[in-house]
Image: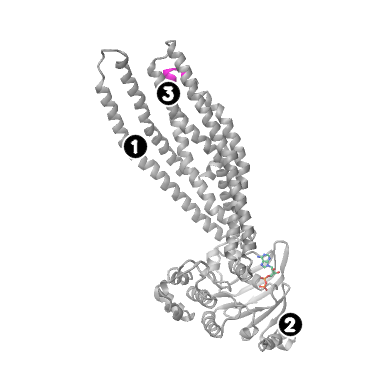
Amino acid sequence: MKNLREWFSTMTLGQTKLYIKLWLWCLFDSFVVSIPYAVLVMAVYVLLIPIASPGMALPTDRIWILMGILIAQFIAYLFVRKKSYLDFCIGFAGATKVSRIQMGEHLRKLSMGFFSNRDAGDLSTVLLRDYTEIETFAQQMLPQVATILVRFSIAVIVLSAFDVRMMAAVFIVIPLAFPFAFISMKKMEKEGALLQSSQQHTASGILEYVGGIRTLKAFNMAGEHFETLKNTLDTQRKAAISIETRAAAPVSMIGRFILNCGIGLVMLVGSGLMVTGKLQVFYYIAFLLLTLTIYDPVLLLFTFIADLTRTTRSGKRIRALFEEKPLPENNVGRKPSGTAIEFKDVSFGYGNKEVLHHIDLSFTEKSVTALVGPSGSGKSTITRLIARFWDSDSGEICMGGVPVWDLTTEELLGNISMVFQDVYLFKDTIEANIRMGRSDATHEEVVEAAKKAACHDFIMALPDGYDTMVGEGGSTLSGGEKQRISIARALLKDAPVILLDEATSSLDPENEVLIQQAISELVRDKTVIVIAHRLRSVSNADQIVVLKDGSIAEKGDHESLLKMGGIYAGLWNEQSHAGSWQIK
Ligand code: ADP
């Protein structure tokens, strides 16, 4: 019982109450829809008696009553259908919408570790296909079950009142057909798992292919990689064909065959009884008519039973995603006093490999700290831990004296602006993309931020100015322009802590000057942590931290580090010379 309740809750996305209410309407709806069948049977009855008894007048008054019932049924049908069908579709589409939004919120609270362990195809399969499966189940199968229940109940009551032997002839074949539905369900389970995993591989393959198309083109490797994608698509095609030919089609054919035998049986038993005078012609016709109305939904039910495992798997995957634990927020509600950041004996690893070892580091409020060091030394990891993309394995990271895990996500991320190298622009207008920094900003504030970030001029030169649509990922803008847009976002947000990843790829001198200018605007009076690749740009920083293999190797300002003559001094010398290299 508990399992059934849990299953139902999974399949209704936790909206059991709403669903039961809508489903009761469906039951009522099915009842109203079944009335014409009853009228049909009554009409046969009313007409057959005068035909069978010569000289008797046709009971026109009764026929008019039946017509009246049909008209009343139609009017009732309109009202009930509006309530049941529309409410059902709208109600459940609403429930899926709410659940999808909740899922979006939930995903936002998960650690980045979760996302790096799942591939994008897998997640998009859950968000798109699994939800669609559940929606279809909710909107089609459950109303169908309501219809079957109502028709069965009416048929059992009416037919058993007519003739128990005939009723047995109608129903006897149904249990015979059920085992086949269950065999198909088992087959579907196996074939469905294969289809689902191949669909997921295809989704990942397509995302990877499209995402990497530039590299593939550049290295003229498209053919080779397309081969992999083609193979995945081929596996999916085979799985789809197999599910139809091995699981779905045989069962619906066998089901249909058995039910046809049922019709034959009703005809045989009926004629036998009629010939021996044990059944009146009216009852015989009534049974033939009603048999069809019972068998049709049974056939549909078979298809749904076969689909049930697949749909249940979709429901379980949605549920499992909801059960992923978000980053814990312990004693939330504490307010940080200021924005000084402190690492106290922090160690961290992605999985088993520790990449930061016992880091003790203070970032004074409204000061600039530069993180330098070779690639892979842990610079980005430090900024990710501050923003709680991951939680450290040991030690404590505090902002304004409060551990970051005691701040709500809103409070923590509200205090931080991040400017990354790989800027993502959403498929929306430039203005909307900048406004992501602060959703309630006015147009004037957006323009002001764009001006400070040296974006205004290039935006005005675009065909629709601030209303110009940018492509997914921002593909229609240059790297430098995208970066300035992301600085405008951060300026608009005006958060007191700035995490900045300096661009590694060299920009053209004009872009570089503009970006430097935008960054100077951004970091004014802020607590700034900048991952620096070119030492020249951070030589004025209040503190420079040199990382090596996940530990702090040196710390100080530019002058003191040069005097120390260690790693920093070496890198500085290297980069000073690198400035003058040329191709011979
Ligand atoms: P840096 O920013 O100094 O180049 P990172 O902080 O990005 O260095 O990386 C530190 C170490 O952590 C590297 O060895 C890198 O391979 C590893 N690393 C970074 N990101 C991940 C990740 N998402 N999963 C696993 N390992 C990672």
* The residue at label 1 has a CB less than 8 Å from ligand 1: no
Region rendered in magenta: 157-166
According to the picture, the residue beneath numbered tag 3 turns out to be 288
x, y (%) of residue 476? 50, 72
Position of the C terminus, as image quadrant, is bottom right
- Examine the rendering and report whether any part of residue 90 can be seen: yes
x, y (%) of residue 240? 58, 46
Query: What is the CA distance from the residue labelled 1 to the residue labelled 3?
Result: 25 Å
Amino acid type, residue under disc 2 in the picture = Ile
According to the picture, the residue beneath numbered tag 1 turns out to be 77
- Residue 102 lies left or right of residue 358; in this view the side is left
**Foreground disc of the pair 2, 1:** 1
Res. 558 image quadrant: bottom right
* Quadrant assignment for ligand 1: bottom right
**Foreground disc of the pair 1, 3:** 3
Amino acid type, residue under disc 1 in the picture = Tyr
The figure's colour scheme reads one colour
Q: Secondary structure at mark 2?
A: helix
Labelled disc at residue 567:
2
The answer to whether residue 158 is magenta is yes
For disc 3, the neighbor class at 10 Å (few under 14, some 14 to 19, many from 20) is: some
Q: Secondary structure at mark 1?
A: helix
x, y (%) of residue 167? 47, 21
